[in-house]
Amino acid sequence: MHWQNNKAMATISTKKYKVTYSIEDGVVVLDNIEVNPSHRGQGVGTSAMHRFMKKFSGRNIELHAYAQDDTTDTNKLVTFYEKFGFSVVCGEESYGFEMKNY
């Protein structure tokens, strides 16, 4: 566990990926998924999400994700997280979006 922006952050990591999250007021907040560049495009991000979702099954999970200015990146992120039951609840084009899974 480490501190980031005055929040206690936890990490699940392997050689292929790292998932960073916190728990705030009983809600699991997914902060970041990083896939090792040599393993991208091989389903590693999907596998990491499945493990994360299984670990916190039955819990309210929020995702605060921010894309770069490229709307193609934003669309890829939205599509990826929608596969796991997340939906966009607010957002500003090119700045970011918040997603919640219930």
Image (cartoon, grey):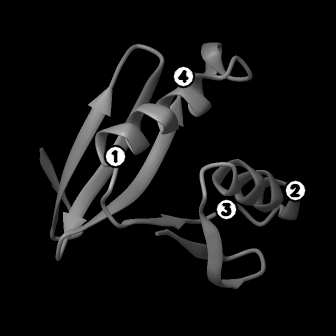
Which SS class for mark 4? loop
Which SS class for mark 2? helix
Q: What's the amino acid at mark 1?
A: Thr
Left or right of residue 91, residue 62 in this image: left
- Residue corresponding to mark 1: 20
The x, y position of residue 22, in whole percent, is: 24, 58
Q: Which residue: 79% across, 51% down? A: 76
Left or right of residue 9, residue 64 in this image: right
The x, y position of residue 34, in whole percent, is: 50, 36
Q: Which residue: 34% across, 63% down? A: 29
Q: What's the amino acid at mark 2?
A: Thr
Per the rendering, the mark at residue 90 is none
- Residue corresponding to mark 3: 67
Which SS class for mark 1? strand
Between disc 1 and disc 4, the foreground one is: 1
The x, y position of residue 7, in whole percent, is: 17, 66
Which SS class for mark 3? loop
Say if mark 1 contacts mark 2, CB within 8 Å.
no
- Residue corresponding to mark 4: 36
Q: Which residue: 32% across, 26% down? A: 13
Q: Earlier in the sequence, mark 1 or mark 3?
A: 1
Q: Earlier in the sequence, mark 4 or mark 2?
A: 4
Placement of the N terminus among the 4 image quadrants: top left
Q: What's the amino acid at mark 4?
A: Asn
User: How far apart are the two marked residues, 1 and 3, measured between alpha carbons?
Assistant: 16 Å
Q: Residues within 10 Å of mark 4 (few under 14, many from 20)?
A: some
Q: Earlier in the sequence, mark 1 or mark 4?
A: 1
Q: Residues within 10 Å of mark 3 (few under 14, many from 20)?
A: some
- Residue corresponding to mark 2: 72
